[in-house]
Amino acid sequence: MLTLQCPYCGVWAEETELHAEGEAHLKRFGPGSSDDEFEGYLFMRENPKGVHFERWRHSNGCGKFFHAARCTMTLQVFGTYSAQTLEPPQDIKDKISAVQPNWSWREFS
Amino acid sequence: MSKAVSALNGASFEGFVKVEETGLRGMITVRGDLDGAEMSAAVKAATGAQMPAQRKVVSGDKGVVAWMSPDELLVVVDYAEVLETVATLTTALASSHALVANVSDARAVYHVSGEGSRDVLAKLAPVDFGKDAFGAGDIRRSRFAQVPAAVWGNEDGSFEVICFRSVAQYVFDLLKVSAARGGEVGFH
Ligand SMILES: [Zn+2]
């Protein structure tokens, strides 16, 4: 059972109190973008065996969206962080690097 | 005007703990900047209570305030006072970006009391109800079986469970099954 700490209300919530909301840090491409950009925004998703960044929502709780960094292979959770950000914070990246020095995910490493 | 009644009109059940629907109760959802001076002044004016800290419930001379999320509070007052309290809050928050909504008739509240109350709750929600983890003045939003609910601890060791009115019967039935004699756990 996956347990994540909601950064907004501080609760250690187990998975059934949360809702998975897909990949984190997607950049929206809307009107005026190219077909390739729009396709990438709508459909192209990472599916790594390893470090992954996800969006979650504390749906049966405070209701807030937040981000989580975890490893899909070891199931280690590196941390959760605010949704009001465009990229993973440095302390989360450092925690990942301590365990998996050569990790990369999209443009982050 | 039609006569207001609560969801289950004060239904109660006595198992190894007592479960009672509390009847009519004034409840107001307030959203806005909880760190703002206006918000704490509004809460003070409406209930006499201080702004609650994260996941805390505080009482004042006129009502109770519960922390629901970083930008949401639940203000609990007597049902007869609710319109007046809404007006007080709306006036106090007039110049900030905020919402005040009377949700009294959209919620149901249960009082759970007696030895083993923690066990009754722990069977239904994925929450640590240990005495060190959850006590008087704490509030926790979670799910009770399949529906969202919130629970807070009272000073006398009893608990209040709040759910949406549309699932009032469901939550009452859950609490009844969980509190039925023969289902004692004796863990907490
Ligand atoms: Zn939360």
Image: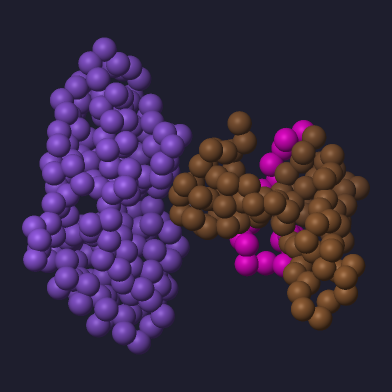
Tell me the magenta residue range. Answer: A74-90
Tell which residue pokes out farthest to the top in this image. B182
Measured from the top left, where is residue B6 in percent x and y? Answer: 17, 49
Q: Is residue B12 positioned above or below B72 on the image? A: above
Q: Nearer the viewer, residue B49 or A14?
A: A14
Q: Is B58 contained in the magenta span?
A: no
Q: Give the colour of chain A.
A: brown
Q: Residue at x 75, y 69 (%)?
A: A28
Q: Position of B95 compared to B181: left or right?
A: right
Measured from the top left, where is residue A36 in percent x and y? Answer: 90, 67
Q: Is residue A26 positioned above or below B150 on the image? A: below
Task: Please state the total of marks drawn on the protein image.
Answer: 0
Q: Residue at x 12, y 66 (%)?
A: B81
Measured from the top left, where is residue A54 in percent x and y? Answer: 70, 51
The answer to whether residue B21 is seen in the rendering is yes
**Quadrant of the drawing holding the C terminus of chain B:** top left
Q: Give the colour of chain B.
A: purple
Q: Nearer the viewer, residue B149 or B44?
A: B149
The part of the image, by quadrant, that contains residue B72 is bottom left
Measured from the top left, where is residue A5 in percent x and y? Answer: 56, 46
The part of the image, by quadrant, that contains residue B172 is top left
**Quadrant of the drawing holding the N terminus of chain B:** bottom left
Q: What colour scheme has been applied to the protein in the rendered image?
A: by chain
The part of the image, by quadrant, that contains residue A29 is bottom right
Q: Is A79 contained in the magenta span?
A: yes
Q: Is residue B151 positioned above or below B58 on the image? A: above
Q: Position of B84 compared to A102: left or right?
A: left
Q: Residue at x 23, y 58 (%)?
A: B104
